[in-house]
């Protein structure tokens, strides 16, 4: 394959104003952060050094791009800058001589950047060339606790700050910082290899990787999250494609990919012009991405066919994808096959008996068999206490009570949900529902659905 021309250099580029340079750096962060960190970890074996040097590269971009102009290939510029920074740091530390030799052997130049054709500078000892996938499997090693796997992946691969991850886990920032430090130390102390595991070990590691990929996708799918978060969803879909290709005999990676595509097809319609959450039944289906829906349903159908042919039952991601397909292929909200969705949630509850699945099942039962049936399931979850502090529990209760005409109780539940909800889009939606519920002569609104 012919090599692409190198960047012409600052002397041949027009300067960029500060806003243009900052926007270019932000766009590069969304697409390149995980690749740069993953490449530096492969080069140096030092997780903290990799993150520090990647951050230094972006700082250098903000300093020099307004003066020298934005490079034609920002990712190559950032990778080279980060690599040079790492080499400089290693040179100052004689004890890291072995790492310096390793970095020299895995040099990346502007003419040969990581990318689709050379994801990590070539295949490693695992025979697989994607550093980001290597990083994910390393982060998801079974020697680490599940919460540490997820947190480490979000920090190193997705570029979330420690504070953002701490909020997601409902812990303090110092506690999350210690958790991340312990996880990195354990990887070093245990000698966990930086590689995609051999084929006979892949199935045992698959569940953790799928869980992290889905969490990464959901970080980007959050309503009103902005372009930075949307980049996380795109990266999760990209990695899911790589994983599905790596494990073609496993139905669940394809199930997860189908699920992501079917959800992502609706992403542009989940928030209105005022920044308010738009629930599924009110979304403009003409704006859904038909190509993603078509691809998602084709991948789902093929994976289900292969699972049946192999005598294997569908796993939780295939079942969730089937639920998403019921929504995505309904021509309008009234045509949604809620009895089928409720039946699929029955299957999912057996495969993944979590409180959140039980709550989603309550919503489906409430739509298929009436709000009274759904409310009974919600009240059972409230008595159980496993979802205490989870805002969707009172929000679901509020919707079911509203549909039953119990407006005073619904208003109390909406207030409880508002007290627990942090997202602006969700808060605006709940506030509007509360206002509708407490207003005199309120007509019965349409049933609410998942966003």
Image: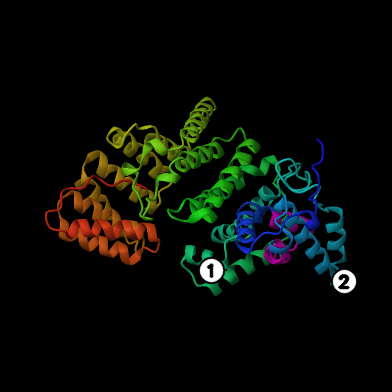
Q: Which mark is residue 94?
A: 2
**Which residue occupies the foreground of this view, 15 or 99?**
15
Residue in view at x 29 percent, y 56 percent: 395
Q: Main secondary structure of the magenta part?
A: helix
Kindly tell me whether residue 339 is visible in this rendering.
yes
* Quarter occupied by the N terminus: top right
Q: Is residue 61 magenta?
A: yes
Local secondary structure at mark 1: helix
Depth check, mark 1 against mark 2: the one in front is 1
Local secondary structure at mark 2: helix
Kindly tell me whether residue 379 is visible in this rendering.
no
Q: Which residues make up the magenta segment?
A: 36-65
Residue 369 in picture, x, y percent from top left: 23, 40
The residue where tag 1 is placed is 163
> Residue 330 lies in what quarter of the image?
top left
**Which residue occupies the foreground of this view, 402 or 193?**
402
**Which residue occupies the foreground of this view, 233 or 20?**
20
Image-based side of 140 in relation to 85, left or right: left
Q: Is residue 269 magenta?
A: no
Residue in view at x 49 percent, y 35 percent: 292
């Amino acid at each position: 394959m012919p090599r692409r021309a190198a960047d012409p250099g600052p002397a041949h580029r027009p300067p960029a104003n500060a806003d243009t340079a900052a926007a270019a750096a932000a766009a590069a962060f969304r697409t390149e952060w995980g690749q740069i960190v993953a490449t530096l970890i492969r080069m140096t074996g030092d997780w903290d050094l990799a993150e520090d040097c990647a951050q230094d590269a972006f700082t250098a971009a903000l300093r020099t791009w307004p003066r020298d102009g934005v490079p034609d290939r920002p990712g190559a510029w950032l990778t080279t800058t980060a690599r040079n920074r790492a080499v400089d740091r290693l040179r100052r530390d004689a004890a890291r001589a072995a790492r310096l030799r390793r970095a020299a052997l895995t040099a990346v130049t502007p003419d040969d950047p990581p990318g689709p054709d050379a994801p990590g500078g070539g295949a490693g000892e695992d025979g697989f060339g994607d550093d980001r996938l290597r990083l994910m499997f390393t982060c998801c090693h079974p020697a680490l606790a599940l919460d540490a796997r997820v947190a480490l992946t979000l920090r190193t691969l997705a570029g979330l700050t420690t504070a953002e991850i701490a909020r997601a886990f409902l812990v303090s920032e110092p506690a999350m910082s210690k958790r991340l430090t312990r996880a990195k130390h354990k990887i070093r102390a245990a000698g966990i290899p930086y590689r995609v595991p051999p084929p006979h070990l892949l199935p045992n590691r698959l569940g953790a990787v799928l869980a992290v990929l889905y969490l990464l996708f959901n970080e980007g799918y959050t309503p009103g999250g902005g372009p930075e978060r949307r980049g996380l969803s795109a990266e999760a879909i990209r990695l899911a494609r790589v994983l599905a290709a790596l494990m073609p005999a496993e139905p669940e990676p394809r199930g997860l990919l189908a699920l992501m595509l079917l959800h992502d097809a609706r992403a542009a319609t989940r928030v209105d012009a005022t920044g308010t959450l738009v629930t599924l039944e009110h979304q403009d289906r003409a704006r859904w991405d038909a190509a993603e829906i078509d691809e998602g349903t084709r991948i789902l159908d093929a994976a289900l066919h292969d699972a049946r042919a192999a005598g294997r039952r569908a796993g939780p991601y295939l079942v969730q994808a089937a639920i998403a397909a019921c929504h995505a292929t309904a021509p309008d909200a009234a045509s949604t096959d809620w009895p089928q969705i409720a039946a699929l949630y029955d299957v999912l509850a057996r495969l993944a008996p979590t409180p959140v699945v039980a709550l989603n099942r309550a919503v489906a039962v409430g739509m298929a068999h009436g709000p009274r049936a759904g409310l009974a399931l919600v009240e059972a979850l409230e008595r159980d206490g496993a979802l205490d502090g989870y805002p969707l529990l009172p929000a679901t209760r509020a919707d079911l009570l509203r549909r039953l005409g119990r407006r005073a109780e619904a208003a109390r539940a909406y207030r409880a949900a508002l007290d627990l909800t942090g997202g602006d889009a969700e808060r605006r939606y709940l506030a509007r529902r509360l206002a509708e519920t407490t207003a005199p002569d309120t007509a019965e609104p349409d049933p609410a659905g998942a966003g």
